[in-house]
Each structure stands twice: as C-alpha cells, then as structure tokens.
Image (spheres, rainbow, N blue to C red):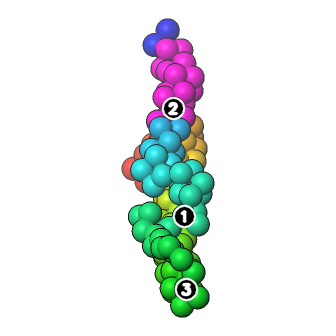
Amino acid sequence: MLVVDYLRWHFYEMPKYILEGWRNYLKFGNYFFSITLLLKSWFSPWKRITWSYGRGFSPTRYLETAISNLFSRCVGAFLRTFIIGIGLVFEAFILVFGAIFYLFWIFLPAILFFCFVFGIKPLF
C-alpha cells in the first residue's frame, strides 16, 4: 500500500502542485513587469510629461511643443520596450526552467533507479 500511495503522490498530486507553482511564477512575472499594462500604454508620454501649446498661434512655439511631446513619447516607447523585453526574457526563463523541473520530477524515479543500479555495479 505504501508503494501505491507514493506513486499516487509522485505522479498525481505533486505534478498538480508543480504546475500551480509554475503558473504562479508566470503570473508574478507578468504582474511585476506590468507587461500587459505597458503594452496598452506603449506610446504614451513618459511619466505623462507633456507640454501645452498655450494660447494663440505661434508656429515656433507650436513646433517646439510638438517636438517636445514627440520626444517624450519616444522616450516612453523606448523605455517601455526595454522593460517589456526584460519581462519577456524573464517569462521565457520561467517557462524553460519550469518545463525542465517538471520533466525532471516525472523522470526522477527512473533516474534514481538507474543511479542506484549503476552505482552498485562497480562494487561487484
């Protein structure tokens, strides 16, 4: 009965916990780097820094304000792209290492068995 309980725990219960933890790490990465929010506001001005055009029409002031606002949006897009990239690298890292850990857990009994068999072989 102990072997059946171990097999049920190892191959049924623990993979569910591993997948749940894996999902939580992925959700954390998305939340920590705010990937979805940054994608929604990708070309917004950086820290909402904008200049107003003022009253009246002055071509030089209008051009200066337009260029300043465009520069603020470019800075925002550049920095958001950088942060989104770091977040996506983190998510890929979690995906790869989570898959490796999950497969390692599934094959762990076989790995331990082969290590035990090949470890005893040199003794004889």
- Residue 71 seen: no
Give the foreground label among 3 and 1: 3
Q: Earlier in the sequence, mark 3 or mark 2?
A: 2
Q: Residues within 10 Å of mark 1 (few under 14, many from 20)?
A: many
Query: What secondary structure is marked by label 2?
Result: helix
Please report contact status of discs 2 and 1: CB closer than 8 Å, yes or no: no
The magenta span reads 4-22
* Amino acid at circle 3: Ser
Q: Is residue 16 magenta?
A: yes
Residue 3, placed above or below residue 57: above
Q: Is residue 32 magenta?
A: no
Q: Earlier in the sequence, mark 3 or mark 1?
A: 1
Between residue 37 and residue 121, name the one nearer to us. Answer: 37
Q: Quadrant of residue 8?
A: top right
Q: Residue at x 54, y 34 (%)?
A: 19
Q: Residue 58 — which label?
A: 3
Where's residue 9, x and y in %?
Answer: 49, 21
Where's residue 44, x and y in %?
Answer: 54, 64
Q: Residue 20 — which label?
A: 2
Query: What secondary structure is marked by label 3?
Result: loop
Q: Residues within 10 Å of mark 3 (few under 14, many from 20)?
A: few
**Label 3 to label 1, Cα distance in Å?**
25 Å
Q: Mostly what secondary structure, the magenta segment?
A: helix
* Amino acid at circle 2: Glu
* Amino acid at circle 1: Ser
Q: Quadrant of residue 102?
A: top right
Query: Pointer 1: what residue?
Result: 44
